[in-house]
Amino acid sequence: KMPVFLASLRWEESENVAVLKPRTLKSVWTIDVKHGQSDETRTGVTIDFDDVVDIEGSRGHAHLVLKFDIATEKAHCSLLTTDDFHSKFKGKKQLLKQVPRAATADDEGEWVPFLAFEARGLEVTKVHIGDDNFDVVSTHGTSFSPDLSDGGDWADYDKGPVSLTGFETKVDVLR
């Protein structure tokens, strides 16, 4: 079975934030990857849900195919939809609790999964947040497109301040 890499986010404090969610799975995501059997890495690699690449010697497809210098075979990675995630972990209740989802104000300070990847021949080590990957919905219902690319903090105004403080991400492996 191919490993699944789960990207999660958290923030320390928020003010008037109701929901924080990926704008769409179909965003272009920038990731760092590592060869599965060596220390060879690639940083700033883009993966796009709309790119569907045939995997050589297979009937399968992936959203990203690349070749590491050390490897004889190409590595590949795909973004998982919610349905893909559910079918992959069917019957595994603990893992199904980690399905990527929108974060709410109740999640403040907790890690919330927002994106899942399935990969062969590589490990996803980091997800770089771009300036158009996330939407914030304020407690007043206004939608914002925060630039979270620097991590850390974000603020705006909607009938009062709307802010996130201490924003960060991580990637874990689910087996």
Image (cartoon, rainbow, N blue to C red):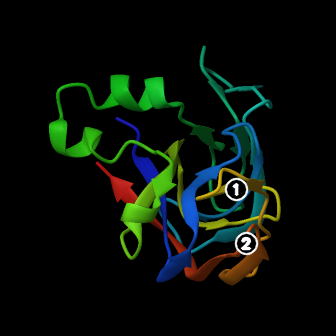
For disc 2, the neighbor class at 10 Å (few under 14, some 14 to 19, many from 20) is some
> Foreground: 30 or 15?
15
Reply above or below: 113 against 84: below
Percent x, y of residue 163:
65, 77
Q: Which residue is mark 1?
A: 134
**Mark 1: few, some, or many residues within 10 Å (few <14, many ≥20)?**
many
- Which picture quadrant has residue 31? bottom right
Image coordinates of residue 129 in percent, x first then y, are 71, 66
Q: Earlier in the sequence, mark 2 or mark 1?
A: 1
**Distance in Å between CA atoms under marks 2 and 1:** 8 Å
Q: Are marks 2 and 1 in contact (CB under 8 Å)?
A: yes
| Quarter holding residue 15 | bottom right
Q: Is residue 175 left or right of residue 151?
A: left
Q: Is residue 97 above or below residue 151?
A: above
Locate the N terminus and report the quarter of the image it occupies: top left
Q: Give the number of the disc on residue 64.
A: none
In the image: residue 173, left or right of residue 41: left
> Which residue sits at x=76%, y=44%?
27
Q: Among all residues in the image, which is located at the extreme front?
A: 159
**Badge 2 amino acid:** Leu
- Camera-side residue of 4 and 130: 130
Residue at point 47% right, 83% down? 12
Q: Report x, y in % for residue 154.
A: 71, 79
The amino acid sitting under disc 1 is Phe
Give the image location of residue 113, x and y in percent.
Answer: 44, 54
Considering depth in this image, is 2 or 9 the residue closer to the camera? 9
Helix, strand or loop at disc 2? loop
- Name the element at disc 1: strand
Q: Quadrant of residue 134?
A: bottom right
What residue is shown at x 39% (from left), y 76% (from top)? 109
For label 2, the residue is 148
